[in-house]
Amino acid sequence: MPLEAVAGRMFSQGFTPFHNAAPRPRGASGAKRFPTFYMQKEIAVHSESAPVVLQVQRNGENVDVAACAGGFGAEQSNGNQSHGDVEQEDRILRDWQLFCKQQAVPAIVRMNMEKIKDLEVEFGEELKFGGPRGSLKGRPGAEEDHRHREFYETLTDSESKLQNFAARQVACRVIGSKGYLCDTCWLPERDCMCDTFDKGRLWPGICLWLYMHPKDFLRKNNTGKLLWQVFGDKAARLTVFGISDHEEVMWNAFKEAGRDKVWCIYPHPPECQVPDVLIPEDLVDRQEDSKDGDAHRIHLVLIDGTWSNSKAMISRLKERASRLWEGRSIPCVALSPTNVSPMHNLRPQPSTARTCTAGAAAQLLRELGMRKELAGFGLDQSADILDDSLTCLQDALVSRRKRVGRTTQRFGRIQCDPVVSVESDDL
């Protein structure tokens, strides 16, 4: 990573990227835009992949900050952490695990959460997330947006921009949704639907990967969340697009399984259909209580984002796969949907052949259940339970719209589309 890019990221986190430079004023009030952090020295980069370590002075304490192509690592203090720092880290971890359960906080998300927490202290109020464009509200939200835009202009490469964008989206949503959204169903607490649908099981030879765009994270009408709510987070795993820590977990599982056991559910281009998915014999003979790892499972990736966002997401998957498997990409599997998702009433799709993420997952399980070698694994029943949960989500959203005085049906143009397609949650 170029040192100027590192300096730009340091600037976003409150470090002044000039030796002994004073913090820049925020405006006429003369208040400091950032806390007084000074860069002390730079340590040479040994290779493109080696970490860049900047030793800085933070409030009189020496701190080593490691950065690499994937983003900043955790700060490593040369002294003891203050009681306030420990308390803030504990709060950040609790806020994160409220919605992400047992996952560790990705480093770049944690740093964005720290900046937002510092804003809350600076303005003396908690930040709330929401509004028509999905952003932090009020005066602190406007200031956070101003600082973010200023920092974003310092980034020079597309990967840094994507990672920062994704981390900021996730951090804002986690902090701003606390105390408002249910941590399981992502609906406002007074509209919680957690007790309205049954939990199910999924044949352990299958692992569903929900590759979610950060703008769909904690979105009320997102349907991809139903996958792990119904089947559990072992059978359905969440990976947020652009969060490198999440993506590495997913790709490590793919490496263990091998390319022939990884498939992406996406219609463009329709390279194959469900009957073409390879089912190794060792998976069919797999025992229900088997403790085998990811090497003995079929990994099916569902793209969870708007149609416009999904193009960049599928490109990122294919590019990474081509590098990993020497030019062999992940094959795209097209479905043959027979039913229109109930979510069409609330959020119309461009065609009846395009459906929401949970609807696509249910159709996928049904088509897999039609395979002779998979007939006895209850995939049809799993699909039915997922469909029931989708109806419960629709009912909860309709009830909420009635309560707040909004229309219960959105009208959109539906066309006949001969291309079999899979779509995730639309705006």
Image (spheres, helix red, strand yellow):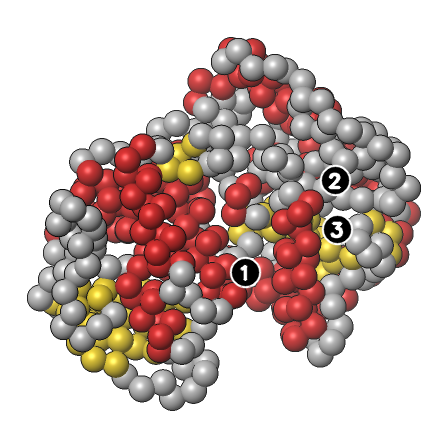
Residue beneath disc 2: 360
Instruction: Give the alpha-carbon distance from disc 2 to disc 1, as whole Å.
Output: 22 Å
Regarding mark 3 in the picture, which secondary structure is present there? Answer: strand
Instruction: Say above or below: 255 vs 104.
Output: below
Residue beneath disc 3: 265
Instruction: Say above or below: 333 vs 60.
Output: above
Q: Amino acid at mark 2?
A: Ala
**Residue toward you, 201 or 318:** 318
Image point (14%, 65%), residue name: 22
**Mark with earlier residue (1, 3):** 1
Image point (37%, 37%), residue name: 136
**Mark with earlier residue (3, 2):** 3
Residue 2 on image: x %, y %: 40, 78
Q: Amino acid at mark 1?
A: Glu
Q: Which mark is residue 247?
A: 1
Regarding mark 2 in the picture, which secondary structure is present there? Answer: helix
